[in-house]
């Protein structure tokens, strides 16, 4: 059997925390377990420093020396040199974007093999830089043999992908259900309730503008019989706490701060409803939805032009509401608060969906099939 040599490319790698970094860690570790597959991973170092090559949980990882990070992108001349060298020994280069440095490295490398691009999201916020980056990004998409997106919503809602529709293939993000279901259950939210009979509504994520936590707080006064738990930190944390205090809902809102992994899983397991109220398509998927669904929790998400409403499905595993609409969000919460039987039915369907569609073992098998073609 001919060996399949794969070069995984991303900005950063574990222990750097991030959704894409978690995925690249999965790909690097688990693809290499298929017979006849050799995986090498090229990323940049966090912060400044020289190049390091190391084995991380069985994965062969090269961290290119970096001069620092600017506008969310590492600056590294050694990355371009290492890309050229490592690509010569690869059959397939798998690039996770957005990552302008990798686009430039591919263009300068002269690599003639197959290129697979995983498109995780459009660039939404940095409009001025995007004008400079546009020619390079279009060059990458034209060069790609396959473009992977986590949902059809990534294609339909993108400013870039519809013209490359024939190259696009769906590869969902995945989790390992057993890692969640084996965690010891503890009433980490229940014990904090002001009203012990209240239904527990849960959100976790960074407290930044696009997550829409301000909309969730504005919705709370229109709800009854529930209390809200918010896990996470970010630049809006104090502003959100002040809003809760000034609007008389502080007793119904519990700010939990950063939760360690095990405690976060216990919070998912102990909540009754999970809400992802994001307001712009910077929220491209929302893997937190899967993490709640695996525990049988109904999800309320928003109808963004991204992958978000393709993860938890409207009236099948939860509700999808208009973004930035507190009253509509409150109405969805009230329905689920008042109908525990409906919550249970939607939650059960969500757990089944995770097992079928978002199980990491199935996802990696599909990725292996695509790379092997």
Image: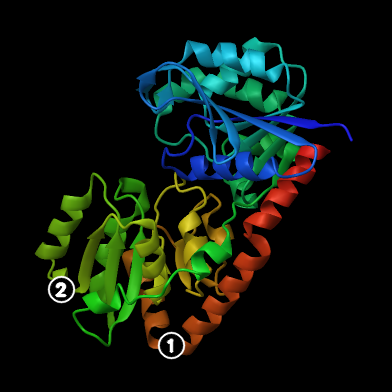
Which residue is found at the position 33% from the left and 49% from the top? 206
Left or right, 46 with reference to 177: left
The mark total stands at 2
* Residue 54: x %, y % from top left: 53, 28
Which numbered disc flags the more N-terminal residue, 2 or 1? 2
Left or right, 106 with reference to 273: right
Screen quadrant of the N terminus: top right
Q: Which mark is residue 339?
A: 1
Q: Viewer-nearest of labels 2 and 1?
A: 2
Which residue is found at the position 28% from the left and 67% from the top? 229
* Residue 184: x %, y % from top left: 42, 72
The residue closer to the viewer here, 243 or 264, is 264
Residue beneath disc 2? 251
Q: Is residue 345 above or below residue 130?
A: below
From where the camera sits, is residue 309 visible? yes
Q: In this view, does 120 lie above or below 55?
A: below
The residue closer to the viewer here, 364 or 29, is 29
Left or right, 353 with reference to 286: right
* Residue 20: x %, y % from top left: 51, 41
């Amino acid at each position: 059997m001919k060996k399949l040599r794969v070069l995984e490319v991303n900005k950063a790698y574990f222990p750097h925390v991030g959704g894409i970094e978690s995925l690249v860690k999965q790909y690097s570790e688990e693809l290499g377990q298929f017979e006849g597959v050799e995986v090498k991973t090229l990323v940049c170092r966090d912060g400044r420093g020289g190049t390091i090559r190391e084995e991380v949980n069985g994965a062969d990882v090269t961290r290119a020396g970096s001069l620092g990070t600017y506008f969310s992108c590492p600056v590294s001349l050694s990355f371009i040199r290492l890309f050229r060298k490592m690509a010569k020994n690869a059959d397939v280069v798998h690039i996770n974007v957005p990552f302008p440095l990798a686009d430039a490295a591919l263009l300068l490398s002269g690599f003639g093999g197959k290129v697979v691009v995983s498109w995780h999201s459009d660039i939404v916020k940095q409009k001025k830089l995007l004008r400079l980056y546009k020619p390079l990004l279009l060059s990458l998409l034209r060069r790609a043999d396959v473009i992977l997106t986590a949902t059809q919503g990534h294609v339909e809602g993108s400013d870039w992908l519809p013209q490359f529709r024939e190259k696009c293939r769906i590869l969902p993000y995945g989790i390992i259900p057993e890692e969640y279901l084996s965690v010891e259950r503890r009433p980490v939210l229940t014990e904090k309730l002001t009203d012990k009979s209240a239904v527990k509504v849960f959100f976790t994520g960074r407290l930044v503008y696009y997550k829409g936590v301000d909309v969730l707080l504005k919705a709370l006064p229109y709800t009854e019989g529930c209390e809200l738990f918010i896990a996470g930190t970010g630049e809006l944390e104090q502003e959100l706490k002040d809003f809760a205090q000034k609007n008389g809902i502080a007793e119904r809102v519990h700010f939990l701060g950063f939760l360690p992994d095990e405690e976060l899983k216990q919070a998912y397991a102990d909540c009754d409803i999970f809400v992802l109220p994001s307001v712009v398509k910077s929220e491209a998927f929302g893997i937190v939805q899967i993490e709640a669904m695996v525990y049988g929790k109904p999800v309320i998400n928003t109808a963004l032009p991204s992958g978000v409403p393709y993860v938890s499905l409207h009236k099948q595993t939860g509700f999808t509401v208009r973004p930035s609409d507190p009253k509509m969000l409150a109405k969805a919460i009230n329905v689920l608060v008042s109908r525990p039987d409906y919550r249970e039915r939607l939650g059960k369907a969500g757990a089944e969906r995770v097992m079928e569609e978002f199980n990491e073992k199935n996802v990696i098998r599909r990725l292996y099939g695509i790379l092997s073609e």
